[in-house]
Image (spheres, rainbow, N blue to C red):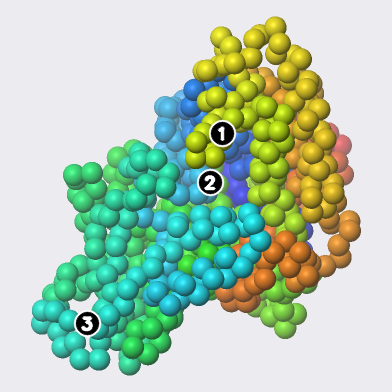
Amino acid sequence: MTRRIVIIGLDSFSYKWLEPLFSRGYLPNIRRLMKEGSFALLRTPIVGATPHHWATISTGSTFKDHGCTWWVRAPKLVEPLYGFSSTTLLAEPIWATISRIGVKSILIDVPQSYPVRWKNVIHIGEDGRPDSSYRCIQVSKGYISEDLYEQYMRKAQLASDPLPDYYKVLARAHLVKIRVGRAQGWEGLECEGLYEAEIPIYLEGKGYVTTARGSPAEVVANFHLLIKPAERLVELYSEKRASAKLGESKLGSWSEWIPYAFTVKGRSLDAYFRFKLLKLGDEGKGLHVYFSQIYPAKGFAYPEGLSEELVKACGPYLHTPTRQQVVLCGACDVYTFIEELEYLGWWYARAVRHLLRSDDWGLLYIKYHSPDFLNHLCAYMIDERHPLHDPGRLEEGWRLWARVFEPADDMVRAALNTLGDEDVIAVVSDHGSKLMHPYYMFSTILAGRIVIEALEREGFVKRNEKGEVDWSKSLVRQGSFGLNLAVRGRDPNGAINPDEFEEVRLRLIEVLRGLRNPITNSHMFKLVCRREDAEALGYGGPRCADIFIWPNYGDHLELEYERVTMEDYAKVGIPDIGTWEWPIGIPTGAHEDVAMFVVKGPGVKSGYKCKKIYSLVNVAPTLCYIAKLPSPKDSTGGVIREILVSER
């Protein structure tokens, strides 16, 4: 009988959080897993993020072999490839390895697992993307009255260039300005002292939308909000008549889940959503109503019929109910954000318990992204170096963090209680987390502009009549981890003769190496080199850019600053970062390049902490070795033998 493997992936989870959580009594099952198994720190690749790291974990190979990053812009490609899609993945993932021997895998929102391309796979969720969901009808939004909307936008305009553009992108995605007026023309309802607003619902899921970015979104429904200031209550209707009521929310409370049949591209699509009244003043002023993501009731699981089974067992499913950007633009407060993450976490925990009951599987693999969203937004709650940190609320902060992590701990509990001693249970993160200095975000946004301006001065970049960069007529193109040259005969509209390629490439490298950050005066990049020179770092290969670039995100700031102050924010033109309950502006947490790996299984040492730091490429080969399975055929990582009893 094949040894079963459970992998619980926690995006962005930092090993540094474990002791503070354990000492407060949180995460007892992860603590138990560490006592019964082994623990290792993992070094992440020098460049990359979610899709790149999870592809490395799942395949045991580097970018050179698996070919996934956020957007793959390789030489010769006309259009970029999306790095979360299974169709972009070049190397064999662990579930394909298991499928080859006729064993079934259960995959829950794992990057590069969708569309389903393999036999013997049960799939739930999407392709692991942490941004706007593929299937959603509408992303989560804050519907706010005109007075509140203008108040927010005034704050955004006070920020220094180029931050206002960043704010506007967030606002367009998650804020809707609505006009509040006196209620009138309602059938079967007395309107005295009541107010109303129209609530448009937009079609935004990437599976339905093909229009260019910036084009007006299609409205698929117009709901009507009846506002009752005296009762601090709002009611939602599909039409302006008493019998068309969908739900209601009192101030600070969620509505019930609302099922509704939307018309999408000419067909009826059943979906669920809920809403919550966050603010309401007299006469309907200061109105703020938050709407969850609107997500289909069917079609989010494979094989057919599983979606309905899971909704019955676990409740309505939302793929990305929230993310840090939702709060940073003012669409909701931090408590609503935590509640949304918590709901998704417990939905996954119930789904894991439900699916574990079947004996007909060999791998259950879930990627839970909420820790990443949590750290990006709420690092200030637990890190005393941030100006929003309140020492008197430290314990409240840890309680809120634990509410997001507890569902993952319950998944570990279910695995420990269900699997036998011959099976394998692992918890792994793709990278760690740390406090973000405001220079980090500002420099990241500013870096693109500095590079473009330098390339334009040297004649590498052309602009169109609107002043926008016209990549199709430029000598350079955006690439995967760097820049591509537009080579005649190789690339669309190539302008560089092949025999001039090397000369132009070296000249461009020197231009990039000379760029400095105007805020910190540090070099913009840690490394700029030819693609082939980057192969020693695990890059290179057909999808790497002609010129490999390793950005400098300001890591030296951790050495220079003991605290982050409001003066630091002021230096980059951010006058207001909100409050503990309503943080706004830019994230407070960033990524760190150390992940963690906890594993329990036959032949694995108990209560052991590795003395060496390993790599993400070691995860899949190690799990397969313990489970007596072949490693993914493209893996280049070795087994972490330090954790094995036989290696004493």
Res. 242 image quadrant = bottom left
Amino acid type assigned to the residue bearing label 2 in the image:
Ile
Res. 184 image quadrant = bottom left
- Of mark 1 and mark 2, the one earlier in the sequence is 2
Q: Residue at x 74, y 14 (%)?
A: 502
Q: Position of residue 46 (x, y in %)?
A: 75, 37
Task: Report helix, strand or loop for mark 1.
Answer: loop
Q: In this view, does 392 lie to the left or right of 233?
A: right
Q: Residue at x 63, y 64 (%)?
A: 159
Q: Where is residue 97 in the image (x, y as percent from the top left)?
A: 55, 26
* CA–CA distance in space, label 1 to label 2: 44 Å
- Of mark 1 and mark 3, the one earlier in the sequence is 3
Task: Report helix, strand or loop for mark 2.
Answer: strand
Foreground mark, 1 or 2, reads 1
Foreground mark, 3 or 2, reads 3
Q: Residue at x 33, y 51 (%)?
A: 217
Residue 47 appears in the rendering? no
* CA–CA distance in space, label 3 to label 2: 47 Å
Most distant residue in the front direction: 465
- Crowd tier of the residue under label 1, counting other residues whose Cα lies within 10 Å: few below 14, some 14–19, many 20 or above: some
**Looking at this view, is 169 or 295 the one in front?**
169
Residue identifier under label 2: 366
Foreground mark, 1 or 3, reads 1
Residue identifier under label 1: 463
**Looking at this view, is 282 or 52 the one in front?**
282
**Looking at this view, is 513 or 421 the one in front?**
513
**Looking at this view, is 238 or 418 the one in front?**
238
Q: Is residue 620 left or right of residue 494?
A: right
Q: In this view, does 34 lie to the left or right of 356?
A: right
Residue identifier under label 3: 183
Q: Which residue is drawn at 70% across and 13% down?
A: 501
